[in-house]
Image (cartoon, grey):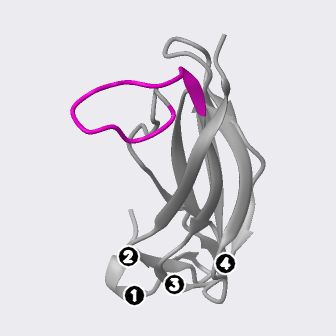
């Protein structure tokens, strides 16, 4: 148990360590490859993430990880970690899947973040089997 109002790190005696924190978005995906008004029409394609524009008030760097599934019951696959800082305007990504979630993590000494309106750029991917 740590006292939240006394900083952002775990302090035990002379030892200071970061308290890892993260959040994960809900499942995202466009099963027909694009937004359709009141219908699901079009080719059955993967959703490709092209870019993420992070919007955070933050201290210290964070990472973004794409958690994806090829089918609803497939095992979850983790992407490489995409590091970003408060100066990062965009993160170019080339991941595609049936559904995905984004995991934002802070694990640095002095780390702190508040989320804003992060934008995700998607496009239709390859045709699904």
Q: Answer with left or right where residue 36 lies relative to residue 62.
A: left
Reading the image, the residue beneath label 1 is: 6
Reading the image, the residue beneath label 2 is: 116
Of 51 and 2, the residue lying toward us:
51
**Quick check: 37 above or below 15?**
above
The majority secondary structure of the magenta stretch comes to: loop
Residue 19 locus on image (x, y percent): 54, 66
Earlier in the chain: of badge 3 and badge 2, it is: 3
Q: Quadrant of residue 74?
A: top right
Query: Which is in the foreground here, disc 3 or disc 2?
Result: 2
Reading the image, the residue beneath label 4 is: 61
Q: Quadrant of residue 36?
A: top left
Query: Which is in the foreground here, disc 2 or disc 4?
Result: 2
Of 90 and 25, the residue lying toward us:
90
Q: Which residues are magenta?
A: 33-46
Q: Secondary structure at mark 2?
A: loop
Q: Secondary structure at mark 1?
A: helix
Residue 126 locus on image (x, y percent): 70, 28
Earlier in the chain: of badge 4 and badge 1, it is: 1
Task: Measure the C-alpha gap from mark 4 to mark 1.
Answer: 21 Å
Q: Which mark is residue 58?
A: 3
Task: Measure the C-alpha gap from mark 1 to mark 2.
Answer: 24 Å
Q: Residues within 10 Å of mark 2 (few under 14, many from 20)?
A: few
Task: Measure the C-alpha gap from mark 2 to mark 4.
Answer: 16 Å
């Amino acid at each position: 148990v740590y006292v939240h109002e006394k900083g952002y790190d775990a302090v035990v005696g002379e030892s200071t360590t970061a308290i890892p924190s993260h959040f994960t978005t809900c499942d995202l995906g466009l099963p027909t490859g694009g937004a359709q008004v009141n219908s699901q029409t079009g080719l059955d394609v993967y959703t490709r993430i092209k870019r993420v524009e992070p919007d955070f008030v933050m201290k210290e760097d964070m990472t973004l990880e794409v958690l994806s599934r090829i089918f609803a019951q497939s095992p979850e696959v983790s992407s490489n970690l995409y590091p970003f800082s408060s100066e990062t305007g965009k993160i170019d990504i080339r991941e595609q899947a049936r559904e995905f979630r984004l995991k934002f993590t802070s694990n640095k000494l002095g780390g702190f973040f508040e989320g804003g309106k992060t934008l995700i750029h998607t496009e239709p991917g390859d045709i699904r089997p």
